[in-house]
Amino acid sequence: MKSKSPVDKPTVPHLSARHRVAIQGELGSNSHAAAVQVFGQASPDDLEIVPCALSAEVFERLRNGSVTTAVLPIENSLHGSVFEHYDLLLDHEVTVVGETLLRIRHNLIALPGVDLSRLRRVLSHPVALSQCRRWLRAHPDIEAVPAYDTAGSVKQLMLAGSRDAAAIAPELAAVHYGAEILLRGIEDHPENYTRFYVLVPESKRHLSAQLPSGANKASLAFTLEHRPGSLLEALAIFHRAGLNLTRIESRPVPGRPWEYVFFVDVRFDDPAALNLAIESLRPHTQMLKELGRYPAA
């Protein structure tokens, strides 16, 4: 049997007849592509992507009900975690109902008809620029200019009519804004993936029960007693329950220097084993929040 690709579309609950999906960034961004990857089975009349300038706006839209769901990056295989999003997950009443992995491809995009030899500037998000260092070093006459968003750089070029500049952005940005791809795949490392969470308001947590029996991953956040060995004891609980701890991330607790919130992802085969581990962990924690259960991408 053919193995599944790491970017296979995840199964997520049908939240409503019409999906209004919030993303951080402009239309044509990698977040936009991830949302299409998740909800690609929906017709254009049933799917509306709602771009947000700030990540906090994504969570506010979930809170006020102006969107049904959100697709938000949580980590990149090269750049690491999106720390702001971990903090926002803890501060807002949302739940994770799915995840997807998106292969990141950086393309050189310009106005139609622009020749590569005429370029003097290339715009993109600082992370995208940092992931294309080899190409930039090979073209020292082209200035790298940081911008707020990859797809937004393409939008800016098209609005300004700049013919001596290009952007580094996803293919979807070129399609969406009517630009032209000059070069494809200029990233340093082809094994470049971003993991995205699919989020719904906490009040819609019950919808995660609509997921098929393939739900086999959970995300948790907790703080521990500030004493020697507390983290070791907590991790041992997952081990004794036969759970595979696939990720652990720590974030500072605001106002409490040198204390941390631990975010963990665990794989499980038996929900009862996960439930037992959570209840065994609870007495050792000062705070414990289950962020969601979902099928692993």
Image (spheres, rainbow, N blue to C red):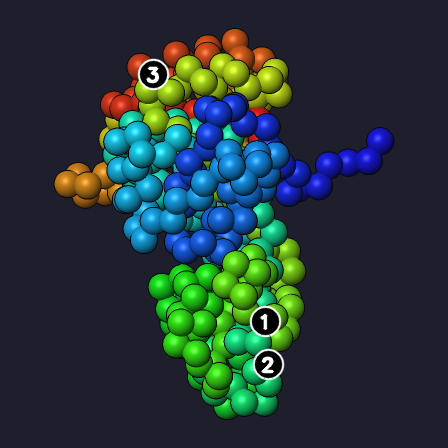
Q: Which kind of residue does numbered mark 3 sit on?
A: Arg
**Quick one: SS at disc 3?**
helix
Residue at the spot x=50%, y=90% of the render?
Answer: 141
How many numbered circles does the render carry? 3
Observer-nearest of 68 and 9: 68
Q: Position of residue 107 (x, y in %)?
A: 58, 67
- Whole-number angstrom distance, CA of label 3 to CA of label 1: 54 Å
Q: Position of residue 258 (x, y in %)?
A: 23, 42
Marks 1 & 2, CB-CB < 8 Å contact: yes
Residue at the spot x=49%, y=14% of the render?
Answer: 209
Observer-nearest of 12 and 112: 112
Q: Is residue 15 left or right of residue 105?
A: left
Q: Residues within 10 Å of mark 1 (few under 14, many from 20)?
A: many
Indicate which label's residue lies in the foreground, 3 or 2: 2
Label 2 sits on residue: 113
Q: Quadrant of the C terminus?
A: top right
**Quick one: SS at disc 1?**
strand
Label 3 sits on residue: 282
Circle nearer the N terminus (1, 2): 2
Do we see residue 144 in this rendering?
no
Residue at the spot x=66%, y=42% of the render?
Answer: 6
Outermost residue toward the front?
A: 45
Circle nearer the N terminus (3, 2): 2
Q: Is residue 278 left or right of residue 261?
A: right
Q: Is residue 112 left or right of residue 238?
A: right
Observer-nearest of 253 and 83: 83
Q: Position of residue 146 (x, y in %)?
A: 38, 72
Do we see residue 11 in this rendering?
yes
Q: Which kind of residue does numbered mark 1 sit on?
A: Glu
Marks 3 & 1, CB-CB < 8 Å contact: no
Quadrant of residue 124 in the image? bottom left
